[in-house]
Image: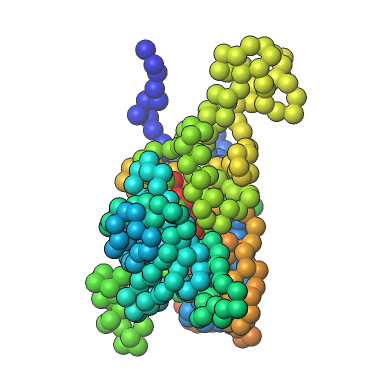
Amino acid sequence: MAGQVNAAPGFNLQPSAQQVVLQTNYITNFDFLNQYLPDTYEKEFERYGNRSVASFLRMVGAEMPSNSDLIKWAEQGRLHTKYVNVTSAAAAGQDVAVLAINDALIPAGGQIALRVGQTIMISDNTANSVLTNKALITAVDLPNAQITVAYYEAGGQQAALGVVTSMFIYGSEFQKGSNGMQGQLEADDIIFDNSPIIIKDRYAVSGSDMAQIGWIEVTTENGANGFLWYLKSEHETRLRFEDYLETAMVEAVPAEVGGGVVAIAAGVASGVGNKGSEGLFYVVNARGNVWAGGNPTTLGEFDSIIQRLDKQGSIEENVLFLNREFGFDVDDMLASLNGYVAGGSSNSASFGLFDNDQEMALNLGFSGFRRGYDFYKTDWKYLNDPTMRGGLVGGKINGILVPAGSTTVYDQVLGKNAKRPFLHVRYRASETEDRRYKTWITGSAGGAATSSLDAMEVNFLSERALCTLGANNFFLFKQ
């Protein structure tokens, strides 16, 4: 019978931070009549290790300033023209036909990118069909998105009347002494934009509590330590805020018309309120590639992902940020290709720089593989942490594929092409105000002398947005 992890005792999700002063953090038991003194461990034990989940954007992105409420950039469109919903008004066998271009993405006014003299290939969209034609465009009807073509083949049109076909331009042909190409094509840039959001946090402690020493030596992930509990709370507030700087960029969504956030914004006196932002998951789900229904666990399934990447930007190197389950699935898939694991002979192939030996420690993990493209694999703590996305059932995300390197876009502010990482953060800044990461202390305690408030208030603020360039090269893996 297969074993399993018992449901209880489980992991603790009880938060350690509360919006009240925890008097239990300080010495309160002064019963000197008790003759039994406990042995105490002064140092706080770090039972959850490094609790921060931020690291993803630091690994794959960059940060750069922006001085506007709106960030805009242009991404290149396709270089070549193809239409996938084309029907003919002629019957099979006809030498000349009028083709209607019915693609939904044709600009208003029927401005199809086809001109007289161009040569096209036509293919029947019916499954397993082998019917194709080569043809010359002899007339173009722009208002009605139609073209007249003459077929090169003696048998005329292969597809039947009204059958949906695909077509693409592969060249042109003109007679001797004829005029040149009529009309021209303009580059089709696609404009995207995003808005920064303001992220805030705050920690406050009274002057009296600052003068009270605790009996536990506290530590935090950034090295802070001491017997003053308020220092721990302040440092944890700072660490929590730094995590939110990343997770907000990953999870943010724009405020949609009809939603409650927009309704709240409408009541703001200035007319400007919460608007949301386009986070990584939102953008890739809307404009990128999505794998749904479990993890790809076979080479055949990865091949379908690779074939989709072929149809996009064909970025050579890609990084897979995965939760633990998906990471194991990839390891198992790659290990199954090993002859030793798959039951092969002693002459079967073995992974690694050196042949596996029975005296060597067995490494069951893989850091990457190559199949058409290079894929580097790493665990993403954010997807595993039970206080964040780890353990979710609804809306579970198992990983994301991020292209490595940078891409060229037209920067609206600079007014020229610029190299930008596929993922980068833009924060608000000018000569007099830098809102990348602001922190300041107010009150009359802890060295501050800004007001009569008998407390120390530590404030945190950032205003930023994530720019996801070339979202068509990303892959989101959903449950």
Q: Which of 471 and 453 is in front in this view?
A: 471
Q: Which residue is drawn at 44% across and 71% down?
A: 138
Inspect this view and state whether residue 321 appears. no
Q: Residue at x 34, y 58 (%)?
A: 94
Q: Residue at x 34, y 54 (%)?
A: 93
Q: Compared to 50, does 365 lie above or below?
A: above
Residue 227: x and y in percent read 58, 52
Inspect this view and state whether residue 299 appears. yes
Residue 317: x and y in percent read 63, 49
Q: Compared to 269, does 125 lie above or below?
A: above
What is the image's colouring?
Answer: rainbow
- Judged from this view, the residue extending furthest toward the bottom is 270
- Judged from this view, the residue extending furthest toward the right is 354
- Image mark count: 0
Q: Nearer the viewer, residue 303 or 245?
A: 303
Residue 467: x and y in percent read 52, 67
Residue 42: x and y in percent read 58, 42
Q: Is residue 317 left or right of residue 75?
A: right
Q: Residue at x 25, y 76 (%)?
A: 263
- Asked which quadrant contains residue 418, the reply is bottom right
Quadrant (top left/top right/bottom left/bottom right) for the C terminus:
top left
Q: Is residue 349 left or right of residue 175?
A: right
Quadrant (top left/top right/bottom left/bottom right) for the N terminus:
top left
Q: Is residue 150 left or right of residue 374?
A: left
